[in-house]
Amino acid sequence: MINVEGLTKRYARTVAVDNISFEVEKGTIVGFLGPNGAGKTTTMRVLTCFLPPTAGTASVAGFDVLENPMEVKKRIGYLPETPPLYPEMEVSEYLKFVGQLKGISSADIAKRVDEVAGRCALGDVRNKLIGKLSKGYRQRVGLAQAIIHNPEVLILDEPTSGLDPKQIIEIRELLKSLAGEHTIILSTHILSEVEHTCERVIIINQGKLVAIDSVANLTNRLRGAEAVAVEVESPDGHPDPSEVQQRLEVVSGVSRVVMKDSRNGRLIFEVESLQGRHIRAELARTVVNSGWSLSELRPVGLSLEDIFLQLTATEKDGDEGNAPQEVEGARK
Amino acid sequence: MKNILLICFKEFKGYFVSPIGYAVMALFGLIFGFGFYTATRDMVQLGFRAQMMGQQQPMSVNEQVIRPLLGFAGTIALFLIPMITMRLVAEEKRTGTIELLLTSPVRDIEIILGKWCGAVLLYLCVLGMSVINIAMLFMWGKPDLKPVLVAYLGLLLQGGCLLAIGTFVSTTTRNQIVAGGVTFFVCLLLWLLSWFTAFESTAFSQVINYLSIVTHMENFSKGVLDSKDVIFYLSMIFFSLFLTSRSMESLRWRA
């Protein structure tokens, strides 16, 4: 549905987005995660045809954002970071205006306004001036504005920022109910948001893509299952990879063993545990009992939290030169 | 076309939700009414004096009241137009609603024309205030209608031209005050151009003179419809709106 290839956006002096590629399939909710200034908003603005890319291509529903912006715009509902509201308009008047702007015919507009107002729970504020609404209601009007023309793709820039927990849950429920018929990209720097609503997560930092994975995979690691890198050395020089793998696989609590690397007679495996099992001690014993030497045993795998901590750390420690790239420290 | 009207009416309505629309109309009505009062009083007094002296001077409402008054209306408009245009785009840039317009399936030119038309519509309402006074002249006198209509057409064209310049200036900043101030000085400059060249007749000064907004208004207020003046205003409007569309486009590239 959304296809981004080698997308780069350069401003006068800074590179906001650096060679990002990703794909989003129809009907999924994708979370766009990263600290402030990571390039989330810029990427979204390129997708919505607000900004042209410096290099690379982006297409929505098969239409390129540069060559066919009109077709792209018709298919996109966009909620920018600050909802684009006219404070001097009434809610229903505003929704009607946006709906017509998005190409809804005047015959259908009243019905559509009713529908989205109901969906976003705006019933009791329909005839109020937008300028008089609370932050939570404004955010909902912003969301209503984005879905009024029933777009195939929804792009939401921090849809829950500034809302109280109850409102966050409401918006989250709303987004979930929209998934399936709509493809949704939402940006956030709140982790639980991604965990609760998204199926996939794209993590970017300083304009670069850090990770794309399904949330299930990522949270799996977060929720107690551990991944351990095991480096095995043999006194006689060359342990048999498949033999080591087999031995590791039968250790109790191990769910998966993947051979990652081998150099100078050292073999590096990545071993994943089942939920809530501690396998490090057992792994060490197995290796040593088999007559190999264990040169390294360390936990790997990034939890969302870890990744996020690392990203924000890079941001904070930016002036100290290289931020810690090792993630192990963050994980206890 | 549908989009232009949509944006036009939204802008027009916006003027009357905020005090701007009422303020501009009231200010214009007040100052124009004052001008109307003095112009008619002077004419009546002149008429009495002529009668007492036993002279039969040819008196013309068109020449002595309407023509200077409508020229005066153009001058008042000069001060009001920055108030009309300053918020057009600058406000949307400041609040971020420009993002809504630029990500909707609407062409830039439709946004610009819509906003400009909305401003012209308000300007028509402002001019409408003067009709109240002018109508009195028609009720109690017999002025010639055609030159009045030509003068109004001139006012409309001049206003459209200044509004287009104001729209352009408004796209260049996110600060309404700056937009209003710059528009005012640009309008003032175009207005003053005729002063610099009043007593010269070199080719250069003629070009400068031609560019002055007021020079072209003179013919209209006399009731003379010259295609040269119409073309001048239309081309100024076209040129300013063209600059506006370039400026809008650059919003995307510079952002």
Image (cartoon, coloured by chain):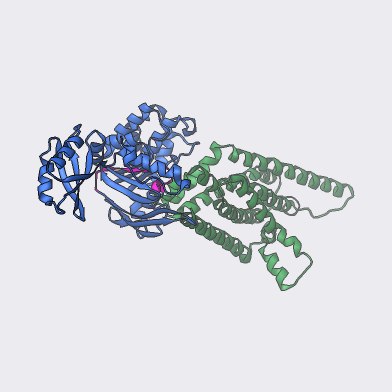
What x and y, as percent, mark residue A140? 38, 34
Q: Which residues are magenta?
A: A25-41
Q: Residue A282 is drawn in which quadrant?
A: top left
As drawn, the chain in green is B
What x and y, as percent, mark residue B87? 56, 45
What x and y, as percent, mark residue B197? 75, 65
**Would residue B202 appear left or right of A323 to someone viewing this image?**
right
Chain A colour in the picture: blue
Total count of labels: 0
Q: Residue A317 is drawn in which quadrant?
A: top left
Judging depth in this view, the residue of A178 and B135 nearest the camera is A178
User: Of all residues shown, which one is farthest toward the bottom?
Assistant: B203
Seen in the picture, residue A219 relative to A56 is either above or below; the reply is above
Judging depth in this view, the residue of B98 and A301 nearest the camera is A301
Q: Residue A113 is drawn in which quadrant?
A: top left
Q: Is residue B47 visible?
A: yes
**Would residue B29 appear left or right of A112 to someone viewing this image?**
right
Judging depth in this view, the residue of A129 and B5 nearest the camera is A129
Q: Which residue does the image show at 51% across and 49% down from the upper left?
A: B115
Q: Is residue B110 magenta?
A: no
Q: Is residue A199 visible?
A: no
Q: Which residue does the image show at 40% across and 28% down from the upper left?
A: A164
What x and y, as percent, mark residue A257? 15, 44
**Would residue B160 appear left or right of A288 to someone viewing this image?**
right
Judging depth in this view, the residue of B242 and B47 nearest the camera is B242
User: Of all residues shown, which one is farthest toward the right?
Assistant: B53
Q: Which residue does the image show at 70% across and 45% down from the upper left?
A: B137
